[in-house]
Amino acid sequence: MSTVAGPSAPAGSDERLLRTSPLRKLLGRPELGSVVGAAAVFIFFSIVADSFLRASSLGTVLYAASTIGIMAAPVALLMIGGEFDLSAGVLVTSSALISSMFSYQMTANVWVGVLVSLLVTLAIGAFNGFMLTRTKLPSFIITLGTFLMLTGLNLGFTKLISGTVSTKSIADMEGFDSARQVFASQWTIGGVELKVTILWWAVLVAIATWILLRTRFGNWIFAVGGESDAARAVGVPVIRTRIGLYLGVAFAAWVSGQHLLFSFDVVQSGEGVGNELIYIIAAVIGGCLITGGYGSAIGSAVGAFIFGMTSKGIVYAEWNPDWFKFFLGAMLLLATLLNAWVRKRAEATK
Amino acid sequence: MGAVLAAVLGASLVGCSSTGGKRAEERAAQAAAEGRSAVNTPRWTFAMVTHSGDGDTFWDIVQRGAEQAAVKDNIKFLYSHNDEAQQQAQLVQAAIDQKVDGLIVTLAKPDAMKDVVAKATKAGIPVITVNSGSAESKQFGALTHIGQDESIAGEAVGDELNARGRKKALCILHEQGNVGHEQRCAGAKKTFDGQMQNLYVEGTNMPDVQASIEAKLQADKNIDAVVTLGAPFADAAVKAKKTAGSKAEIDTFDLNAKVATALQDKTLGFAVDQQPYLQGYEAVDLLWLYRFNGNVLGGGRPVLTGPQIITSKDAAELAEYTKRGTR
C-alpha cells in the first residue's frame, strides 16, 4: 500500500489510525529479512574463518561493503520508485575518467575536474530520467542503452585522449592531496584501518533513509513505485520524482568514481561492467521489491554488508574462489525467499 | 521407463571409448609427480592474488605450477583472483589480514596495487610479482618479478610475422585495461614491417570474440595474420576465419591442448609461450627459498619465463603436457 500524505485524516474509528504493536511494526520492516540474513552470514564466517573476526579484517570487510553500499542506497531508492539503472556500474568509471582526463588535459586544479565530473555525471543521470519519462519505455531498455553507450564512450574517449586504455596519473597535480583526503583517505582507529568511503556510505544511507521516511519526496517515491498512474492522479509529480531518483544514482556514482580515481591515481577505462547488477542484488537482499513500491535504504546497506562479508569471508575461510558466484546466487535466492516469507507473515497479521 | 533405463545403461557399457575421456586423464594424472613434501620446513602459508577473470585456462596452469611447488615445499597455498583492480587490491588486503607468510601478486593494473603491496612489505610479508608488472615490481618493493617482458614478447611476434612474410596483421586484445596486453601489441607493431591494427573484444564472452573477429575479417580482406593474446581466443579466431572465408594465418600468445594440436595440423602458424607453469612454480619456490635461506633470484631484474616461439615442429612433444594441464 502506498502511503501518500493526504490532508489530515478525519478522526474517528478509521482503521488507518489503529495502533500497531511494536513487534508487528518490526515484522513489517522491509529490511528485517536481510538483518536476519546478515547475522547468519556473520556468525557463519566467524565460525569457519579464523581470520574473519580480526579487527583488521573488519576494516577490509567494511571497505568492501562501503564501495557497494554507496551505490546501493540510491539504487534502492530508484527501485522503490519502480525503475532500474543498468548504467550505474559504468557510470562510476565514466565519472572517474571525466575528472581525471579533464584535469590532466586542461592542466587544471584537480578540483576543477572533480566539479566538471559532477556536472557531467548528473547530466547523464538526468538524461536517463528524461528519456525514461519522455519515451515511457521500460527503464531496463533505456538504461541498457546508456550502459552500452557509456562503455563505448569510456574506452573510445580514453584511447583518443590518452592513447592507452587507462588515464595518465594525476597524482602530482595541484589539489590532488586535498581531494584524496575527501574521497580516499583512511584513519586508523584502535588498529583498524577505516577508509573514508565508510563515512560516505553511512552519510548517504542516512540521507536516503531520511528522504524516504521523513519527506514528501519520499512519499512520492513510494507512490510512483507502487502505482504511478494513481500517483499522478492524486497530484504526485511523477516525472520530477523519477528524474530526481536518477540524479541520486548519478551523485553516488560520482562519489564512487572519485574514490576510484583518488585511491589509484589512474583509471582503467574498461571497468565497472557488471557492478550495476551487484548494486541491484544488494538492494534486493535488503528487501527492495523488483516491482517497486517497497523497500528501504538501510536494507540496501545491510545487503551491501552481506555482500562484503561473503566476498571477503570466502577468502578468509580459505575456500576455493571458483565457488564464489554460486554462494552469491544462493544467498540472493535465500534472501529473497526470506523477504517474501517475512512480508507475507507481516501482511497476514495486519 | 525401465526399458529406456536399461537401454541407456547398455549403451554406456557397450559404448566404451578406448581413447580420451576421464580414463585417459586419470592415467596422465598417475604419471604426474607424486604429492609429497620434500622438505621439513614449517608449514608456511603463501597466498597468490591474480587479475584473472573467472575460469581462465592460463591461470589454471599457473595455479597448477604453484600447487606442485607448494606440495614439494610443504606450503599451504591459497589462491584468489578478480579482474577488477579495486577488487584485486581488496583481496591482497584480505591476504595481509590473514597474516600469510608470503604473497604472490600480479601487477596488471599497477597503480591500483601500489598501496596494498607497500602495506604487505611494511607488514613484513615478502612479495613476489608474477606475470605482468616487470617495470613496477622493484619500485613497489617486491623481491623479484617472474614473467615475460611483454614488450620483448611482442617484438618477437613482430619478427616472426616478418619472417613469415605477412603484410597486414590484427592484434586481438581480450582484457581491456591490461597494460601487458597493450605492450604486447605495441611491441609487435614496433618490429612488424607491415601494418598492424588493434581490436578489442570482450574476453569473457566467447561468441562475441568470434563475431567481432569475423566482422573485422569480412570488412578487410587484406588482413593476412591475426594474433590473439590468449590460447582460447586462437580457437575462436580460427572459427571466425572459416566463416569469414579469410586466408589469414592465426597466431597466438600462450599455449593449451587445442593450440598444440592446431599447431600440429597447421591451422595455427605459431604460438608464443610464456610458460605459465613456471610462473606459478617458481614464485612459490622462490618465496620458500627466501623464507628458508634468504635467497633472491634475478639480481634485481625480472626473471624471464618467455617468450618461447613454438611452431609445428615442437608441438608434438608439448601436446602431451598440455593435455595434463601443465603447459
Image (spheres, coloured by chain):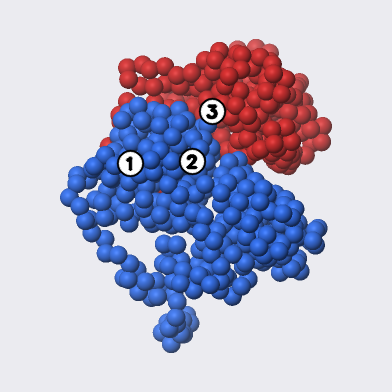
Chain colours: A red, B blue
Q: Residue at x 37, y 71 (%)?
A: B28
Q: Quadrant of the C terminus of chain B?
A: bottom left
Q: Nearer the viewer, residue A310 or A102?
A: A102
User: Can residue A215 be seen in this snapshot?
Assistant: no
- Tag 3 secondary structure: helix
The answer to whether the residues at label 3 and label 2 have Cβ atoms under 8 Å apart is no
Q: Which residue is mark 2?
A: B134
x and y percentages locating residue A183 in the rendered image: 54, 19
Quarter of image, res A137: top right
How far apart marks 3 and 1 lie (CA) works out to: 29 Å
Crowding near the residue tagged with mark 3, few <14, some 14–19, many ≥20 C-alpha atoms within 10 Å: many
Name the kind of residue labelled 1 in the image.
Answer: Val
Q: Residue at x 60, y 31 (%)?
A: A267
x and y percentages locating residue B306 in the rendered image: 49, 54
Q: Chain of mark 3?
A: A
Q: Nearer the viewer, residue B55 or B66?
A: B66
Q: Is residue A196 above or below residue B117?
A: above
Please give left or right for residue A217 compared with residue B37 in the image: right
Q: Which residue is mark 1?
A: B296
Q: Is residue A15 above or below residue B64?
A: above
